[in-house]
Image (cartoon, grey):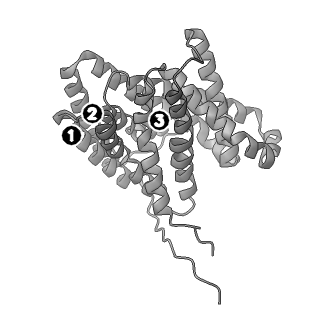
């Protein structure tokens, strides 16, 4: 029997803390265009991964079929679009609103599986989606009372969640046939190339940013990416998907706390109310769609 080298629940906590910092880091680097921030997040991640991939996984590239390459390219493009839209939303709306709305991605993913794979809804899933979407409406209405630009930021965040759904839907079958590291490397590489092209078209400068911005770019590549999403993927070996989804739902909470202390962003009544309703709806949604499996984590025992 295999045991985890350390408690996977600790890994989930570390992962949530790491991804919670993402929106705040983007705000701190706001002197650069959103697409440039996104580009360097993925590019630096690819550069960090490259030596390991070339040493341990380069043989996998010869085994990838043309269809899988096409699906990976589409997944990478949608990932790039997700980052462009989400990071851009942070130029218009608050961290709390943006992150809560992006967290609706599991609901859009479920809608996508219904449309493309005919996966059926349970009654509980439908009710929980209505609750979560009602909460997002409260947030958007509250932001609209502040300014039209804040509402525009909310719309960008929702579109970012939809793009992330496309990323998952195009990549889910390829992910089953490739190792996690190889698939991630390919998709991040495609995403980075997409962003390079996008920035060239918009004539965004790739250089000339303050030193602290380059530090933020690097931190974005390391912490939310490797200490966030990679730890979530590792924890999947030991705990259920629904458990990890529950953890990720707390990202808006962590992001809002960090934004309060670092950016001095205060949460409005509409954000408190709407965000609480969204999180409640997401909890119900995850509970109503999780598989009925029992997962136990045993501590390692010394051999006798």
Closer to us: mark 2 or mark 3? 2
Q: Position of residue 188 (x, y in %)?
A: 63, 34
Closer to us: mark 1 or mark 3? 1
Residue found 69% across the figure and 49% down from its top: 179
Quarter of the image where one finds residue 218? top right
Q: Give whichever of 113, 180 is nearer the camera.
A: 180
Q: Position of residue 77 (x, y in %)?
A: 59, 26
Question: How many residues crowd around disc 2 within 10 Å: few (fewer than 14), some, or many (20 or more)?
Answer: some
Q: Specify whether 204 is left or right of 106.
A: right
| Residue 104 in view | yes
Residue found 58% across the figure and 28% down from its top: 40
Q: Give whichever of 215, 39 is nearer the camera.
A: 215
Sooner in the amino-acid sequence: mark 1 or mark 2: 2
Give the structural element (helix, strand or loop) at label 2.
loop
Give the structural element (helix, strand or loop) at label 1.
helix
Reading the image, the residue beneath label 1 is: 272
Sooner in the amino-acid sequence: mark 2 or mark 3: 3
| Residue 240 in view | no
Sooner in the amino-acid sequence: mark 1 or mark 3: 3
Q: What is the spatial separation of the Cα atoms under label 1 and label 2, in whole angstroms?
A: 13 Å
Question: How many residues crowd around disc 1 within 10 Å: few (fewer than 14), some, or many (20 or more)?
Answer: some
Q: Give whichever of 224, 168 is nearer the camera.
A: 224
Which mark identifies residue 112? 3
Quarter of the image where one finds residue 237? bottom right
> Which quarter of the image is occupied by the C terminus?
bottom right
Which mark identifies residue 82? none
Q: Specify whether 120 is left or right of 234.
A: left
* 301, above or below 46, in the image: below
Reading the image, the residue beneath label 2 is: 265
Contact, mark 1 vs mark 2 (Cβ under 8 Å): no
Q: Position of residue 64 (x, y in %)?
A: 77, 39
Q: Position of residue 181 (x, y in %)?
A: 67, 46
């Amino acid at each position: 029997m295999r045991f985890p080298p350390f408690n996977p629940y600790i890994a989930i906590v570390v992962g949530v803390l790491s991804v919670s910092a993402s929106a705040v880091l983007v705000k701190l680097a706001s002197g650069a265009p959103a697409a440039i921030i996104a580009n360097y997040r993925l590019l630096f991640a690819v550069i960090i991964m490259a030596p390991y991939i070339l040493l341990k996984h380069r043989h996998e590239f010869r085994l990838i079929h043309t269809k899988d390459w096409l699906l990976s390219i589409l997944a990478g493009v949608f990932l790039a679009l997700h980052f462009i839209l989400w990071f851009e939303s942070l130029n218009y709306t608050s961290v709390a609103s943006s992150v809560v709305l992006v967290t609706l991605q599991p609901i859009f993913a479920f809608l996508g599986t219904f449309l493309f794979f005919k996966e059926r809804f349970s009654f509980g899933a439908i009710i929980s989606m209505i609750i979560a979407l009602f909460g997002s409406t409260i947030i958007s209405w509250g932001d609209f009372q502040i300014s039209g630009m804040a509402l525009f930021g909310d719309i960008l965040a929702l579109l970012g969640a939809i793009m992330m759904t496309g990323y998952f839907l195009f990549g889910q079958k390829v992910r089953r046939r490739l190792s996690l590291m190889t698939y991630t490397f390919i998709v991040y590489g495609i995403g980075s190339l997409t962003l390079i092209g996008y920035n060239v078209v918009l004539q965004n400068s790739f250089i000339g940013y303050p030193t602290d911005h380059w530090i933020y770019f690097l931190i974005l590549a390391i912490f939310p990416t490797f200490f966030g999403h990679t730890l979530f993927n590792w924890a999947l070996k030991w705990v259920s998907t629904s458990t990890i989804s529950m953890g990720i739902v707390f990202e808006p909470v962590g992001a809002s706390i960090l934004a309060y202390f670092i950016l001095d962003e205060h949460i409005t009544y509409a954000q408190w109310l709407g965000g609480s309703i969204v999180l409640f709806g997401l909890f119900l949604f995850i509970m109503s769609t999780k598989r009925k499996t029992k997962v136990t984590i045993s501590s390692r025992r010394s051999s006798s």
